[in-house]
Amino acid sequence: MKKSLLVLCVVTAGVLAACANPNADWQKANQQNTVAAYQQFIQQHPDDARVAQARDRINALQDEQAWTTAQSANTLDGYQQYLQAEPNGMHAADAQDKVNSLQSDAAWSSAQSTNTAAGYQDFLQKYPNSPHAADAQAALKQLTGYQLLLGSSRSQAAADKLTKHLKDKFGSDLQDVVEVPPTGKSKTIEIRSAGMTQDEAKAACAKLRKAHQHCEVVKSAS
């Protein structure tokens, strides 16, 4: 009895395989248009000429699914995961744009949070074409809109000597000492501090005056 049942099962399987119609199965896979449907077609007809096409459609469907998932999350991690899974995907360029935009937004938030000249300068260096670049430049100008005028000279040698002296003695207070070349008809080289806020410039100037160093709070030269 068991032997007869086994024979019947083998015969039935053979009949079903013989009845399998590649064209009908391909049409069915196209109608369903799912990863599972194309995978089933490949399993049923591994030698069919349309197997390569089926694999292409599987890749395209998986790409679309990964992109939809990334868009739904709309996070830096989500788009990075898409790029990792589909580095050559149809939406790779869009995903990279999203990554760049979200990274820029995060860096801008960080720069605003710290609100320092160094933070805005770092942001502008990394993201010069960001939509926030103009705001960063405005914020940077506000933070560095003042300098200390420390001296002037018509002699380059004298200007260099004074610049070195001020850097050696007051470098930490002045952040930097720069020489501003003459403009227009002027022949005078100005020696100034790095850019500061007005409050920082006033505090630094008060400290230098106690050390008997001449200084004057002025608007930044540039």
Image (tube, rainbow, N blue to C red):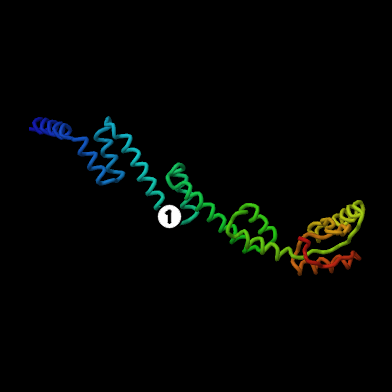
Relative to 145, is 57 on the left or the right?
A: left
Q: Residue furthest front?
A: 185
Q: Residue at x 59, y 56 (%)?
A: 130
Relative to 38, is 174 on the left or the right?
A: right
Q: Nearer the viewer, residue 70 or 216?
A: 216
Establish if 47 lies above or below 132: above
Residue assigned mark 1: 71
Establish if 91 lies above or below 148: above
Q: Residue at x 37, y 45 (%)?
A: 62
Quadrant in the picture for the N terminus: top left
The percent coordinates of residue 7 (x first, y second) are: 11, 30
- Mark 1: amino acid: Gln
Relative to 21, is 158 on the left or the right?
A: right
The percent coordinates of residue 182 (x first, y second) are: 85, 57
Q: Residue at x 90, y 52 (%)?
A: 156
Q: Nearer the viewer, residue 178 or 86?
A: 178
Give SS at disc 1.
helix
Please identify the quarter of the rendering in which residue 10 is found.
top left
Please identify the quarter of the rendering in which residue 109 is found.
bottom right
Establish if 86 lies above or below 190: above
Q: Residue furthest left?
A: 1
The percent coordinates of residue 111 (x first, y second) are: 63, 60
